[in-house]
Image (spheres, rainbow, N blue to C red):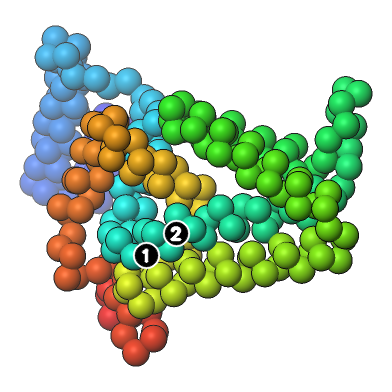
Amino acid sequence: MTRAVPYLLRRGRGDDAALELTAIGRTAVAVKRTALDAPARGTALAPYEFSMNDYFQRQLAYYADAHRDQVNSVMHIIGNPLLFVAVVLPLCLLPVSVFGVQTNVAPLLVIPALVLWIAWDAAIGLALVVTAILLLFVAAAIADRVGVFWAWIIAAGLFVIGWALQILGHQFFERRRPTLLDKPVQMLISPMYIVAKLFIALGFRADLAAVLQKSHNQTPLGTPPYPVKNGVDVDRTA
């Protein structure tokens, strides 16, 4: 600040320079007092700490805000497992040996998603691990009983049906565009949302119930963030 004095005086600003220096000085004193008083008041000036669970709950609330219709929810409950089997079925055709254990590529590529789900929420993640194992067995059983050609045909059919359920649910019932179009990570939140709703229905996870309830209270049901008009998404800023 002292270096600014000659510069301001050389500019010939006179009283304006004095007033500006006074304001700068007062601001510096206020910032210093805030920093010194923060520990006494218990105010945290520590760096922002990233929490996986907090991140998951924010994403869950974002997802829930665009998935309120019951019919659309049921279509997602059916469509999500179909899409999972459709993706892993062709991978079950690729055998691989891991530490002497004969398996296929499918479980190896699913593991990163399972780890991420557990990191976001342990209980929901473990439930999804069990679900994924069952669906992997289903996909492996189909791959063992049909040839390569029919495995691809079945996978393609399940893929089309799964996405059709998702799209039709949003287009005709939810009347909101899928959240994954704005945030691709929402594709991983979708199965977690289904399990979260199941836990809540069984009387567990009051914390997630509060998150979903808060999300529903933020935006009235009649004013969706991404309304659909004449089959075309309408931006809320339009």
Under tag 2, what secondary structure? helix
Q: Evaluate whether residue 201 shows in this view.
A: yes
Q: Quadrant of the C terminus?
A: bottom left
- Looking at numbered disc 2 in the image, what kind of residue is underneath it? His
As drawn, is 100 to the left or to the right of 111?
right
Q: Is residue 15 above or below residue 70?
A: above
Q: 26 and 148: which one is in front?
A: 148
Give coordinates of residue 129: x percent, y percent: 57, 33
Spatial CA span between label 1 and label 2: 6 Å
Label placed on residue 72: 1
Residue pointed to by mark 2: 76
- Looking at numbered disc 1 in the image, what kind of residue is underneath it? Asn
Q: Residue furthest front?
A: 145
User: Residue sitting at 67 percent across and 69 percent down?
Assistant: 157
User: Residue sitting at 45 percent across and 51 percent down?
Assistant: 190
As drawn, is 160 to the left or to the right of 222?
right
Give coordinates of residue 76: x percent, y percent: 44, 59
User: Residue sitting at 25 percent across and 32 percent down?
Assistant: 203
How many marks on residues?
A: 2
As drawn, is 58 to the left or to the right of 42?
right
Give coordinates of residue 108: x percent, y percent: 75, 37
Q: Residues within 10 Å of mark 1 (few under 14, many from 20)?
A: many
Q: 142 and 4: which one is in front?
A: 142
Q: Is residue 168 above or below residue 2?
A: below
As drawn, is 115 to the left or to the right of 64?
right
Q: Is residue 2 above or below residue 18?
A: above
